[in-house]
Image: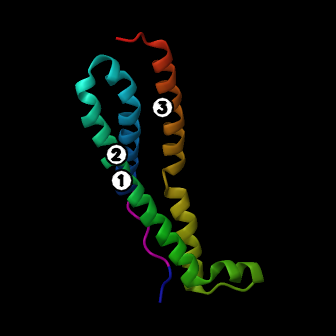
Amino acid sequence: MSYAPKIIPKPVIVGFFIIGLLSSVAFRAIIILQRYTPGWVRPVWYLGVVGYMIFFMYRYFISQRRKRTIAHSGIIEKIRDGSTLNMEEREAALYLLNSVRASQEDWNYLAIFVLSIVAIALDLLLPGK
């Protein structure tokens, strides 16, 4: 019995990263839209909310997969005790490490941070309508 699920394919990972990024852009674009084209605020807000719902359900799914792998393999206790890992436990450890390495979450966090700074700057610098 293998404890390790398969890594999600790179195009799927990138696709969810793009959904998260577009949602982040949508929320920050509201600052500009409310000044110049207020009719677009609600549709863009819904785009952002639905995109984040999809993105964060995906992130929840990934987090649950990792936690389930850790729980079923008992890998933390085995590493803590210095026990030798069998093949399935090694596969679980490799899955966990590769899953973290393949994740785009650090780029998403950086993008959200930078876009937030840009949104604040635009709000402060752009003239009101």
N-terminal label among 2 and 3: 2
Residue 102 picture location, percent across and down: 49, 57
Q: Helix, strand, or loop for circle 1?
A: helix
Residue 84 picture location, percent across and down: 70, 86
At 42% across and 66% down in the image, what residue appears? 61
At 32% across and 23% down in the image, what residue appears? 33
Examine the rendered structure and indicate whether residue 56 appears above or below residue 67.
Answer: above
**Numbered circle sitting on residue 36:** none
**Numbered circle sitting on residue 115:** 3
Q: Amino acid at mark 3?
A: Leu
Q: CA distance from mark 3 to mark 1?
A: 19 Å
Examine the rendered structure and indicate whether residue 48 appears above or below residue 62.
Answer: above
Q: Amino acid at mark 2?
A: Val
Q: Amino acid at mark 1?
A: Met
Residue 70 sits in quarter: bottom right
At 34% across and 54% down in the image, what residue appears? 54
Q: Are marks 2 and 3 in contact (CB under 8 Å)?
A: no
At 36% across and 53% down in the image, what residue appears? 53
Residue 74 sits in quarter: bottom right
Disc 2 crowd rating (10 Å Cα; few below 14, some 14-19, many 20+) is some
Q: Nearer the viewer, residue 70 or 47?
A: 47
**Numbered circle sitting on residue 49:** 2
- Which residue is the site of mark 1? 53
Chief secondary structure of the magenta portion: loop
